[in-house]
Amino acid sequence: MTVVQASEADLPEKSIRRTFALASRLRARLGAKDANGAASRMALIAFVIRVISAAIAFVSQIIMARMMGEHEYGIFVFVWVLVILVGNLSCLGFHSAQIRFLPEFVTNNDIDQVRGLTTTARIFALVSSSTVALLGYFALSLFGETIESYYLIPLTIGLFILPMIALGDTMEGTARANSWALIALSPTYIIRPLLILVFMIGFVHFGEPKTAVTAMTAGLAATYLTTVVQFFNIDHRLRKTFETGPRRVEFGAWVRVALPIFLIEGFGFLLTNSDTVVTGLFLPPGEVGIYFAASKTIAFVQFVMFSVKAASGPQFSALYAAEDRSGLARFALSSTRWTFWPVLAVGLTALLFGKFLLSMFGSGFVSGFDVMVILFLGVLGRSLVGPAESLLTMAGEQILCVKLYAVALAANIILNLLLVPMLGIEGAALAAAGAMWIEAIMLHLAVRNRLSITLFAFARHPVAADGSKE
């Protein structure tokens, strides 16, 4: 679930309709062609950056895995996933609430609230994440003896990274709300992973050991440098665009929107990362490293789903706002087919070269091929209903989406707790795949019941709002 989708999903139906009306007025002012062109450029830039990021992440993880070995690499990826997860969630949805409010404030020429929200979001992110970091430090002090010793120092370093992760996510939200796609996404998805690799290689070159502690130190340096530069860059753009002036803060209204975003994004983020976290809790670091490498190798398949979501979301909005239910049904089915068949083709290609790709991490990582196969079957099942959650969100069914994600997350965690101790990393893969199938079934039923649309890749016809086939 992308940040934009999550930020839109918190709105009640009346607010969604108001947002559509604002978008319509903006298109009228700028011209529909220019507005659509800007949206298309934003989506294209976002997709290109994510693809480049995936390639960088894949290559950098191979290099770091070969440098550190399975054990130390497993420690690093487990702690790093925790840091990214907790850092993002510690914003409590405020980073994405900007994407909901800032365009509306700009459209209404309410620049005082623009200044107030951007400033408040930064302060809130730093305070909340620092509070979480302090609580984490006290937890390590009290319960450190119950944690494996090789995790303690990396976890402590991770606590110092949390505030910069939260601030970086907040600055990304500010930039995305202003359609500054390149400076919004490139720091997190391109610059930071490159700097982690550069710092790691540099530290090792000057005699530091090839351990998870060194890798986390590289992550600390890269995150602070990236976030600080991003902060001053975006702050300069804000001052240049809106100039200095008074700030108006409506914290209560913003929190009421931010918290639903937090729930939706939190469920989605936990759903994506819970398997790695649970494997770290039950399995030795070497197994965690193998699982992470396998999951990241097959993750290329998910970029097909990401691209279709990015392209279909605005069209879903327009068709639903125009009350063109027949067109919405046809487009939804078409989007589903454009999701499933490319996922099948890309996934089979990835599996064809799977053992070779895993061997690039190191000879011991080839044992993760079965994990790749199982995860691919899960992604394939999820692709059968295409961008269903985006369709529901654009149709005002955001509360239902929260409930579905909560059920899918609960199923994922329960399956992980049951299967990982028994089957190891294959159990984690089965849990993740099972949760994806459960999610797909629930989304299919939800779309059918709420929108009267049959969203299934092999469906011959969509079902329009009046129940007739198109």
Image: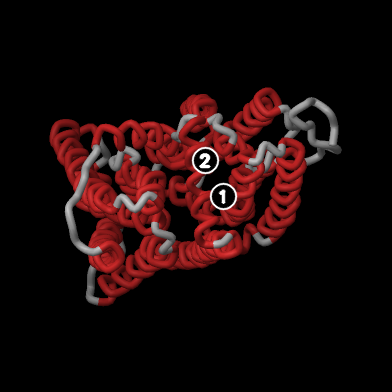
User: Residue at horizontal 77%, vertical 32%?
Assistant: 464
Q: Is residue 216 visible?
A: yes
Secondary element at image label 2: helix
Is 20 left, or right, of 164 in this rendering?
right
Return the residue nearer the eye: 434 or 29: 29
Dot 1 crowding, Cα within 10 Å, few <14, some 14–19, many 20+: many
User: Residue at horizontal 75%, vertical 51%?
Assistant: 341
Return the residue nearer the eye: 81 or 72: 81
Is 452 left, or right, of 63 in this rendering?
right
Q: Which residue is mark 1?
A: 368
Q: Which residue is mark 2?
A: 425
Q: Earlier in the sequence, mark 1 or mark 2?
A: 1
In the picture, residue 251 is in which quadrant? top left
Q: Is residue 58 visible?
A: no
Residue 275, how many percent across, how many down? 47, 38
Residue 176, how many percent across, how many down? 41, 56
Q: Amino acid at mark 2?
A: Ile
User: Residue at horizontal 18%, vertical 57%?
Assistant: 245
Q: Amino acid at mark 1?
A: Gly
Residue 227, how many percent across, how many down? 27, 61
Marks 1,2: beta carbons within 8 A: yes
Answer above or below: position of 445 versus 41: above
